[in-house]
Amino acid sequence: MNKVESIEEFYKRKFDWMPDNIKNEIGHFNVFQHEPVEPGKIRSLPYKRRDFYKIMLVIGDINMNYADKVISVKNQALFFSNPHIPYSCEHLERIKNGSYCIFNQHFFHKFGDLNQYAVFQPAGNHVFELTDAQVKQISSIYKKMFEEIKSDYVHKYDVLRNLVFELIHFAMKMQPAIQMDKHPLNASQRIATLFLELLERQFPIDENHPSISLRTASDFASQLNIHVNHLNRAMKETTDKTTSQIIAERVLQESKILLKHSKWNVSEIAYSLGFTELTHFNNFFKKHVELSPLKFRNI
């Protein structure tokens, strides 16, 4: 997997300059207008993680690659990215208009946990198709950002944080309402939640996190300090799947991502996903995909 891009590397790649306040003690925030891609400039962003958050209004026909999914934006959309989820963007030359803001975690230090919001969670929605009316509403928020960041108002960064929250909540209100269970979680639900959080914490695989350490139901049960039979019962009760099935599905998803987006060979990918023998990984992959890992990589 490609190296995680820092916010400094973003400025060097995009603008070949560095803002003076990049190391500001209150964290970093900036907002930009999309500019047409110049001849000779890159027309796609490589698949990787960035160490900053980005909220982007795109007007144009582009493809967003997230995990093992490709999301095609035909007209206009609002896109959310964060330091935990790798992504790539194709056909940058097709972006006709739009705006985006970037900020790091430190910018929201003591102002809330951004990761509690679904738009920044692995299982959440990250791309929201917009109507023309919604584009006008989003554009007005970005307009306020541009005005505020140029102002001399002493508390302008507080205003900018509020505008970021406006974008987050605008998108989340577009999602179907989720009926919250008013009853407390039972023991099985609590175990299932802890297991899924522990499973997801092992991903994505990259140079900073080169391999998973928990591979079997017994590994997770030991980490959760419960008997493996207790874990299996809890998962079957809450998801109607076995613990091993859920682990296999997540490992398969990550294997597809690595085969399509990393430069690692198949042996390195197998090792990173906890397979001690390459043949075991090949058999596992062919069982679920009906293709060998190499054939899948080349299609």
Image (cartoon, helix red, strand yellow):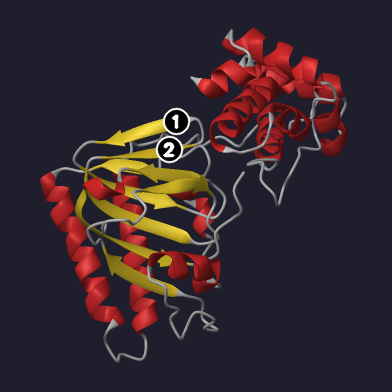
Q: How many marks?
A: 2
Q: Report which residue position mark 2 lands on.
A: 65
Q: Is residue 205 left or right of residue 138?
A: right
- Which residue type carries mark 1? Lys
Q: Is residue 155 above or below residue 97?
A: below
Circle 2 crowding by C-alpha within 10 Å: few under 14, some 14–19, many from 20: many
Where does the image place residue 113, in percent across and percent down from the top left?
54, 61
Name the residue nearer the viewer: 184 or 254: 254
Q: Nearer the viewer, residue 66 or 144?
A: 66
Measured as percent of width and height from the top left, residue 210 is found at: 74, 44
Q: Quadrant of the N terminus?
A: top right
Residue contact at pointers 1 and 2, CB within 8 angstroms: yes
Residue 35, above or below 243 = below
Residue 72 found in image quarter: top left
Q: Residues within 10 Å of mark 1 (few under 14, many from 20)?
A: few
Residue on which disc 1 sits? 69
Q: Position of residue 36 (x, y in %)?
A: 22, 58
Residue in view at x 36 percent, y 57 percent: 55
Q: Residue at x 33, y 76 (%)?
A: 159
Helix or strand or loop: what does disc 1 sit on?
Answer: strand
Please identify the quarter of the rendering in which residue 243 is found.
top right
Q: Amino acid at mark 2?
A: Asn
Residue shown at 11% from the left, 46% from the top: 132
- Cα separation, mark 1 vs mark 2, equals 6 Å
